[in-house]
Image: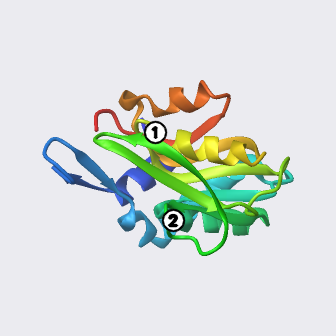
Amino acid sequence: MKSSLEDTLLAAIRTIPDYPKPGILFRDITTLLGNARAFRRAIDELVHPYAGQKIDKIAGIEARGFILGGAVAHQLSAGFVPIRKKGKLPFETVRVAYSLEYGLDEMEMHKDGVSPGEKVILVDDLIATGGTAEAAVKLLRQIGADILAACFVIDLPDLGGRARLEALGVPVRTLIGFEGH
């Protein structure tokens, strides 16, 4: 029996078969974002374990992590730091390369986005293989962030992303899981 939270979130997430390529079940959270009740429940659940703690920054991964992370930062009275694809930020940046299915990509953040020792929570919509989230962790650590957790609405546990982050010593919090991908 699924909890009320799981029922609410599952009902609010659209699954699109064969996107972006055949065999993939794309978990689309734009429907969750458009549903005020589901969006509020998701943010409340992401915030709950950290309420009352001193969190300095929320780091959100482009692009859905900006939406979720901004709301989480607001609720926790923390600053927000965008982690973006290479070439999208106007000031001096730090950068990390990471592997994609067919090559490499880079992500970056402003070098003054986080100060050494600041307590940071990483936020994105979904954890799959964990490659992007792992790169974000390495980027934040490169400038001295203390990463308290990585939080996601959706976990695709079959793809191993959670284990990849936990192997780096980062606790992972997810709200719902989908078997398969």
Residue 99, compared with residue 28, is above or below; it is: above
In space, the residues marked 1 and 2 are separated at their CA atoms by 26 Å
**Crowd around label 2: few <14 · some 14–19 · many ≥20 (10 Å):** many
Q: Earlier in the sequence, mark 1 or mark 2?
A: 2
Q: Quadrant of residue 55?
A: bottom right
Instruction: Indicate the amino acid at tag 2.
Output: Phe
On the image, the x and y values in percent for residue 53 come to 85, 50
Q: Secondary structure at mark 1?
A: helix
Residue at 36% in and 28% down: 158
Whether residue 101 sits left or right of residue 142 in the image: it is left
Image disc number at residue 148: none
Q: Residue at x 37, y 31 (%)?
A: 159
Instruction: Name the residue nearer the viewer: 42 or 5.
Output: 42
Q: Nearer the viewer, residue 87 or 132?
A: 87
Q: Which mark is residue 39?
A: 2
Residue 60 at x, y percent in the picture: 59, 59
Disc 1 packing (10 Å; few <14; some 14–19; many ≥20): some
Q: Is residue 3 visible?
A: no
